[in-house]
Image (spheres, rainbow, N blue to C red):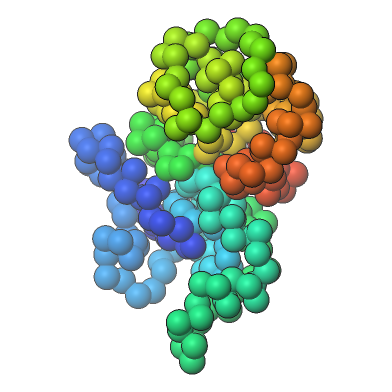
Amino acid sequence: MKVNIISLTCCAGCISSFLNAGEAFLEILSEDFQIVYSPTFIDLKEIPKVDLAIVEGGIKTEEDEKLVREVRAKSEFLIALGICATHGGITSLGNIFSVKKLLEKEYSILKGTKLPELKDLMYPICNFVDVDYYIPGCPPMPFLIVHTLKSIVNRKQPIRYQSVVCTECHRRIMPAKLDRLYGIYEKEADPKLCLVSQGFVCLGSLTRDGCGAPCPRAGFTCFGCRGPADSLMYRSRDMYSFLVKVISKRTGVQEESVREELYRNPFIFHTFIFSRFERFKSRERII
């Protein structure tokens, strides 16, 4: 199987996670898996036709769109790798500002320099091309990438995770009566109690499982980098209101106060507000 690896607007963390698979990565390469194009690894100018393309990053420039369309046309299967490619990702925080403000704020020192033509928003790649498999995460865990690629190489359907991160966290969920919500650094967290029950804004109750819950297990709140779980995608499109109700019910904090706090939390924006689930070619192909 010949493979292209493409990076659009991103931090390259997803491909780095792939490399962090270590021996499992080498095992894939020893099978019928040949990387023939990747600016990270190979100095090749022309994009060849292949069996599989792996794309990290989202669409923020006209060049991004042109590139992803070419990659799609030259591949039998296409994988969207990481939250930027699948949902818009943390790079979609730029959507808070207009293109004009972004250029004035971030590129004022580059006056006179020719910059890429920016789109109005940061988009997931499924807004422009058909995607065969989605592997969300920021970045996706190495074992998720490896398992998916092995399954595709062997012409098998990858395991699809459908529950929420809370099922992998194992912290005890208990209702509480709190006066307000807390930032994760404002107080020490009880290692056995649900972070939401302690007043922290954790998105584990909405987020797709499969990662092993490394963040809440370590005492840091889940920020939703795997996107919404199936139960949220099929049951309700108003995931923001659902999150408000969950936090209010577990903490005793009034919904309006919860809503005000969430407006100040950038993680909520990049993961859920800009997700375009209705454009997914097949929800059953989200790993």
Residue that protrudes farthest toward the bottom in the picture: 112
- Residue 219, position as x, y percentages in the image: 42, 23
Q: Is residue 179 left or right of residue 16?
A: right
From the viewer's side, name the closer residue of 164 and 180.
Answer: 180
Q: Is residue 230 left or right of residue 61?
A: right
From the viewer's side, name the closer residue of 95 and 71.
Answer: 95
Q: Residue at x 54, y 64 (%)?
A: 68
The answer to whether residue 129 is seen in the rendering is no
Q: Quadrant of residue 163?
A: top right
- Residue 220, position as x, y percentages in the image: 44, 28
- Image: 209 above or below 114: above
- Residue 261, position as x, y percentages in the image: 67, 37
- Residue 110, position as x, y percentages in the image: 45, 84
The answer to whether residue 7 is seen in the rendering is yes
Q: How many marks?
A: 0
Q: Residue at x 38, y 24 (%)?
A: 218
Q: Is residue 44 left or right of residue 118?
A: left
From the viewer's side, name the closer residue of 179 and 226.
Answer: 179
